[in-house]
Amino acid sequence: MIKVEEKGLYGNFGAGHDKQKRIVNTNRLNAAAYSACASSPSFSGKELSAIQKQFLALFPKREARLFNFMKKTEEFIKGEMGGIVITAVGTGLVAPFPIAFNPFVKAKPGATQEEKDEVRRTKAYSAWRQPISAVIALLIQAGVQKPIDRFLQNLTNDAETAAKWRGDVLNQASLNDEDYLKRKIKGEFKDGTLKFENGNIFDMSKGSDAVKIGEAKDLKEAISTVQKQRTESQLETIAKTLESDGVIRMGNFNIDNNITAEVVNDSIDKYIEAITDMKNKPQDIDFHTRRAEVLINNELELDKLIGKDALKDLPTFTETIDGKKIKRIEFKKLKEYLEGAKSRTNNEDVKQIIEEILNKPEAVMESRCERTFERIKSIREACGGTFDADTYHMYMHKQNRMLQKINDQLEKLKIKDLSKATPEQIKAAIEQIPDFLYCDSSDKELRKVLKRNKGLFIPDAVEELMKKGTPPNEISAKIKEQIKGKVFNDIAQTYKEFTANKFKLFKQLTKVGVGVFITLPISCTVLNWVYPRFMDLFFPKLAGTKKEADAKKNGGVK
Amino acid sequence: MANPKVMANPINNFFANVLSGGTRTKPYTRLAAKIKPKTVEDIIAYATIGSVVAKDTVGCAMYVTQSLNNEKIPEKRRKFVAALDLTNGGLMVASQLILFFAMRKINDKLFYKLFKSFGKDGKLFGGYAERLRADAKKVGAEVKSKSKLRADYAGMKHLAISLFRSVTELVAATILAKRIIVPFIATPLASKVEKYMDKKGVGGSDNGQAATAAESFKGSQQADKVATQPDAMSQTSEKGEVTNLLELARMNKKQ
């Protein structure tokens, strides 16, 4: 890994950020991660995906640190635990002060020094109850949160108790919670069913032969690896049952049809959202058309100023990313060059384009220069070789219409009446989805558009199949099959997220109930017992107020 | 001794029956139906503040009941003490809810000031996405589409903003409202309630004398009660002795 800092280079990301020296550690932008990463966002707040880590590497240091801190402390600041911790902080660290130093509480006018001291001791005695209360609340109320989480996970994931929920989404017998799986797997490593040795994970349950099932750096990663494998396997099983029977099976029960139908509708909504994202926004089409005109009309001058030949003599540095050496133009030199180029031209349009490149983060400028010419090429292709503003304008509208057509068809597939959904309806809806997400090579224009979201609509394998010389009709069949498999898997994944959200609510409400009716009265009782004894033991002088009151009441010290 | 694992099953089965029954009730199913990816964080936030307020309410109820039934408090004082407990409890619940919802209005603005990378207009995303795509191209890796990158970026933003909202709303309610604002309001309010009760003849004929004598300790009692909710600390020890200093002082004065 070469630290770009050694070459005296800086990264500056986005207007409005503090311009500061930063080490652009490009090893974090790991090429392997690009290939391997999952694109689903981390809504559950579990591990960040590889792409999310790459984004974080581009943030200013302060923001990245703050984000990481929030991520690490997430379980202590969210939900019921967050309520308890923040309340305890307020009780223990803030509440004593308004009591001990309350300006409205003072001895009456003309009071003696002893009376004034008495008031001061009373306030101090009262104030001490707060931190004691906070510690007890943390120990008792916060202390039960994790056991409650585990208990509820066990109830909803163990087949025997999960069956009580029958066809409800809280029945997680066949699609286990990730934390539950990790605990189970940890137990299997302990009892020898699984073994971790020299970076290899072995399954010891298949008789005398150890079967290698994966690799990991350490035991924690090994547990995570095995958990991911099992979750994948469970999702595949659910997808297969959904494909064959139109139901999601949990243990011995089928999830209620209305829930399955809702999940299918949610999945269709996700595809619709992805397709809508690919459309050109109507308000942008006019801008893109004008911009296309400017680029085409000024292509020669742009090539002279910021084309490949113009930049080839600028100093470069070598970066190593994932073992590959890449040459980049030094950021500062490129910026200086572009500023010079801008001042050399009298063409306002060209000045504007260069200004826009200069306003981008430094690390993106070189790619922006390259992309300018790629855009010119794609604009010409869109117009069939020769640019025409009206043709280009209509081309963008045509793309939008094609994509809207897909959205309209997908919208029709959604199950309207969830309460009356049947497995046959569900199966029929899902099976039609791939037909709308796929287009064969005869519709080149649509395929070009859909390829923008490669992986979702056009499986990556299509080009490989073409390279191998597979006949077109076989390619179509294989691709359709792949898309169909992906759709069922996507729905299984959507169901998993659906379950996770419902389980969050269930946990939260259970914890509120336990907190209000069980741990709160217990905390109060414990506080009632501990407080006077603590004060008698550690602050006898403050506690002496009470003893004196007792003495006066009873006519003498007991 | 019975095997704990075997013993656990009947317990687990019992709780599974109870909880599964609870999740089949209408109020629960109606609430669960509202849970969507975009609403789950809001619902969790409401449940959390609801929990804090519920504890304060239960604590207040315990205080009031204990005050009304505490034989160590002179009979003519009990209603007055209970009324103060109720006032403080109500003040605490109201102030927490007001500040919770007020913070909801402004916390997004604070968030975008703290995290400029998650720019509200989404313009910064474009720059970051371009950099990632450019780098992927350079190393010959798969260039992810913008919509895929946007989904991951949105996931990070969602995580950060939901945590930020959670903290600021709770801090506003449980620290700012309950621990700073309410103690300072409760004390002067307590004087007004006391005067009102004296006027209406609640608490007996020597009200004026007792009130004067107790003036010095008034704020202490109010601040004490306010600050200890929702701990719902009983004002009597386990032996039934009065631990409320204000009441002790008043009783001593009477004697």
Image (spheres, rainbow, N blue to C red):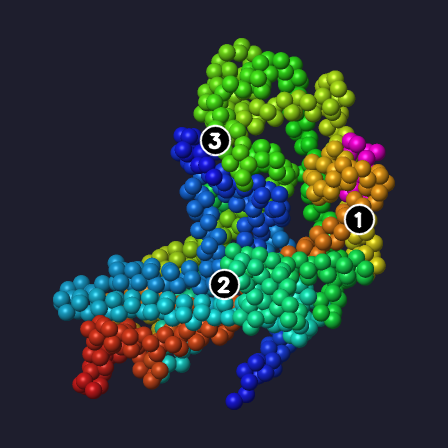
Up the image or down, B111 lies above or below A44; here it is above
Residue A15's label in the rendered image is: 3
Regarding residue A397, the answer to whether it shows in the image is yes
Between disc 1 and disc 3, the foreground one is 1
Tell me where residue A541 sits by quadrant.
bottom left
The residue carrying mark 1 is: A481
Q: Residue drawn at (47%, 70%), measured in percent from left and top? A: A144
Front residue of B212/B71: it is: B71
State the image coordinates of residue B130 (x, y, percent, origin top left).
57, 33
The magenta region covers A433-446
Mark 3 and mark 2 lie on one chain; the one further toward the N terminus is 3
Q: Residue drawn at (65%, 74%), measured in percent from left and top? A: A161
Spatial CA distance of label 3 from label 2 is 39 Å
Spatial CA distance of label 2 from label 1 is 45 Å
Label 1: few (<14), some or many (≥20) within 10 Å?
few
State the image coordinates of residue B238 (x, y, percent, origin top left).
35, 82
Residue A80's label in the rendered image is: 2
Judged left or right of residue A91, residue A252 is right
Up the image or down, A458 lies above or below A218; here it is above
Regarding residue A349, the answer to whether it shows in the image is no
Q: What is the count of numbered marks?
A: 3
Spatial CA distance of label 1 from label 3 is 46 Å
Q: Secondary structure at mark 1?
A: helix
Residue A361's label in the rendered image is: none
Mark 1 and mark 3 lie on one chain; the one further toward the N terminus is 3
Between disc 3 and disc 2, the foreground one is 3
Please report, as a chain letter, where disc 3 is located.
Answer: A
Q: Is residue A445 magenta?
A: yes
